[in-house]
Image: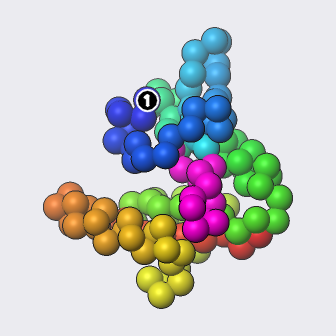
Amino acid sequence: MIRSANLNRINLKWPNFLVAEEGGAVVGIGQVKAHGDGSREVASMAVVPAWQGKGIGSAIIKTLIAGEGDRVLYLTCRREMRDYYERFGFRTIARADYPPYFARLIRVVNVFALLARTEVLVMRRPG
């Protein structure tokens, strides 16, 4: 699922994953990654294409957010997904406000994103 959704494979911790199942089959996944700089990231979000648009991703995100209490959360997403994540209280932040992990990551990621004619944004949700 991670490969087919072309997700970042860095720092995957399988015990941290929230898994959505339907009829015994995995239909969606997501996790919160803790980074060395103290930032926490909603990450590794994927929903099986046949199940997209049915609320699976929203349920995963809401559950992950609820599990973090009042912690500030970050995420990275393609600019095309900005409106989707804004529904959950995430807002795009300026480069000057990136935690160190994201400041290092985003420079490299956006070189490749430009080749795909997109941009990767860093978003934050206040705790």
Residue 78 picture quarter: bottom left
Q: Is residue 107 one of those drawn in magenta? A: no
Colour mode of the rendering: rainbow
Report the residue at 51% width, 35% height from top: 47
- In the displayed structure, 80 sits above or below 4; it is below
Question: Image quarter for residue 69?
Answer: bottom right
Q: Is residue 43 magenta?
A: yes
What x and y, as percent, mark residue 28? 56, 32
Farthest-out residue, bottom: 96
Q: On screen, 70 above or below 11?
A: below
Relative horizontal placement of residue 88, taking residue 53 as reference (left or right): right
Task: Give the x, y percent position of residue 37.
Answer: 58, 68
User: Majority secondary structure of the magenta segment?
Assistant: strand
Q: Residue furthest right?
A: 69
Would you identify the image quadrant in which residue 86 lies?
A: bottom right
Asked whether residue 127 appears in the rendered view, the answer is yes
- The structure residue drawn at horizontal position 75% and vertical position 45%, both measured from the top left corner, is 63
Q: Residues within 10 Å of mark 1 (few under 14, many from 20)?
A: some
Residue 30, position as x, y percentages in the image: 59, 41
Q: Residue at coordinates 26% horizontally, 62% vertically from top-left?
A: 113
- The range drawn in magenta is 32-44
The front one of 71 and 28 is: 71
Residue bearing mark 1: 1
Taking the view exactly as shown, the residue that stands out farthest to the front is 36
Residue 127 percent coordinates (x, y)? 77, 69
Q: Is residue 72 left or right of residue 14?
A: right
- SS category of the residue bearing label 1: loop
Q: Identify the residue at the far top of this view.
A: 24
Q: Quadrant of the N terminus?
A: top left
Amino acid type shown at disc 1: Met
